[in-house]
Amino acid sequence: MATAYEPYGPGTEPRRGSLLPAALRAPFEARVWREFLYLVLSFPLSLLTFCYAITMLALGVGLLVTFLGIPVLGVALAGCRGIGAMERARARSLLRLEVADPEPVRSTTRRSPKPGPFAWVGALLRSGTSWRHALYAVIHLPWAIFAFVVSMVLWVNAWGLLTYPLWQWVLPTYTDNQPGIQLFEVDGRGFFLDSPLEIAATSVVGALLLVATPFLIRGLTAVDRLMVSGLLGPSRLAERVWELESDRGTVVDTAAADLRRIERDLHDGAQARLVALAMDLGLAKEKLQEDPEAGARMVEEAHGEVKLALQELRDLARGIHPAILTDRGLGPSLSALAARCTVPVRVSVDLPERPAAAIEGIAYFTVSELLQNISKHSGARTATVEVWRSDDRLMLQVCDDGRGGADARAGSGLAGLAERLDAVDGLLVVHSPAGGPTSVTAELPWRG
C-alpha cells in the first residue's frame, strides 16, 4: 500500500524499503511542494478570475435592458469556461487530479439546426456547465485566500523555527537589544529565545510543525479537488447522456452488422440454393416427358437440395433467436448449444425465474460466441458454463482448460462482445494467463 505522502496517480508504484516513516519524509517529497505551490498560485489566479467573472456578469446583467446584455453574458460564460480549462490543467499538473472535460457547447438543436453566433450564445446561457464554471470563479476566491494564508503561515514558520539555530545569530548582530525571537513582554522586559535550551526547543517545535503541516496542506487541497471535480467536470447527468449515446451507437452498429450478416447468409446460402433448385426443377419437368428415369433422378436431387435449404434456414433462424430459448429458457437452450460445441462442455444453470427476454437473448449469444472461441482458438479439452443470479444481476461464467492468452483489449471478438454488454450496462471480465486456463465472466442486469 502506498504511504500517505508518496506520489500518486496512474502508474505510480509505492516505494519500498524506505528508512524514514512517511510522516518524516512528507515535508521533503515533491507531492507536498506541488500542493503548496498550488495553494500559493490559487490566491493571485482566483483574484483575477473573480474580478473577471464579477465584472462581466454584472455588466451583462446591467445591460439586459438593452440588446447588448445577452451577448455580454455569453462572452462572460465563455470566459468562465476558459478559466475552468485552465484550472483543470493546473489541478492535473500540480494535484495529479484527472478531471474529464465537460460536455461541449452545442449550438445546434433540432429546433435550431443552423449554427450561428446567436445559437452559440443561447447554448451558453442554457448550459448548466457554463454557470457552474461561473460559480467556481466567484466562490473560489474566499477559499483561496484562506488556504493561502494558512498554508503560507504554517509552512514558512515551520521551516523558520526548524532552522532557528542557523539564523538566530542574525538578531543580536544586526538589531539593538534583541538577542533572539521575542515571545512576550512584561513590565518593559521582553522574554527572548536566546539560550541554547530555548533555541533547541524552538527547533523541535519547528520540526513538529513541519511534520504536521503537509497533512494540513493535503486537507486544504482536498477541498480544492472537490471544487474542481464537482464544478468544473462533467455532470453526472451529462456523463449518463454520453454513455447512453455511446451505447445507442453500439446497439445501432450491432443491429446493422447483424442485418448485413443475415442478408449475406440469405443471399449466399438459402437464396442461391433455392434459385438453383428452381432451375433444376424446371429441367426435371422437361426431362420427365423425354426420359422419365432421368427426370426422377433430378427430382430426387432437388429433394436433397430442399432439405439442405431448409437446414440452412433453420440455422439462420436459430442465429436470429432460437425457438428453444423462447420456449424453454436459458437452461435447455444452453445445453443444446453446448451439445454442438466440439469440446465437451458441462452446463450448470441455477435461476429461480427467467430474466427479461432481451437479457436472456444477450446471455445466450454471449455464451454462443464464447463457445465458438473455445472451439476455434483455445485448444481446450473441457469447458464449463455456469449461470446464476446475484441480487439484480445475471451472472454467467465460461471456463476452459485451453492455452489461454485471450485479451479483450486486443481488438478481437471479445472486444466487440464487451462493447455489446456495455451497451446494456453489462460487464465482461477476462482472465486468461498464458498457458491457461481461461475464465470469462459476464454480468448483465436482470431486467434490462
Image (cartoon, helix red, strand yellow):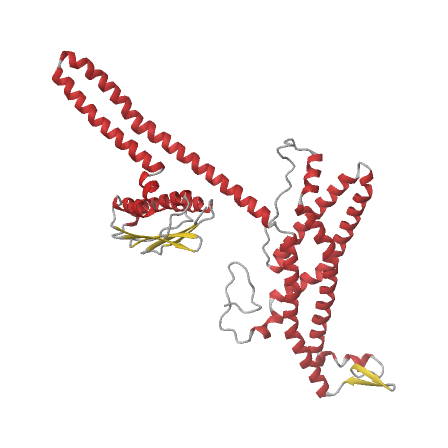
Q: Is residue 276 above or below residue 201?
A: above
Q: In the rendered image, is residue 45 in sight?
A: no
Q: Is residue 176 left or right of residue 346?
A: right
Q: Is residue 188 above or below residue 311?
A: below
Q: Is residue 164 left or right of residue 324?
A: right
Q: Is residue 192 left or right of residue 124?
A: right
The answer to which quarter of the image holds residue 276 is top left
- Provide residue 200's location: percent of width, then percent of height: 69, 84
Q: Nearer the viewer, residue 389 or 8?
A: 389
Total numbered badges shown on the rendered structure: 0
Q: Residue at x 76, y 50 (%)?
A: 53
Q: Residue at x 51, y 68 (%)?
A: 15
Q: Is residue 319 above or below residue 231?
A: above
- Provide residue 48's location: percent of width, then percent of height: 76, 54
Q: In the rendered image, is residue 8 in sight?
A: yes
Residue that sits furthest to the right in the current view: 188
Q: Residue at x 74, y 45 (%)?
A: 76
Q: Residue at x 35, y 40 (%)?
A: 326
The answer to which quarter of the image holds residue 304 is top left
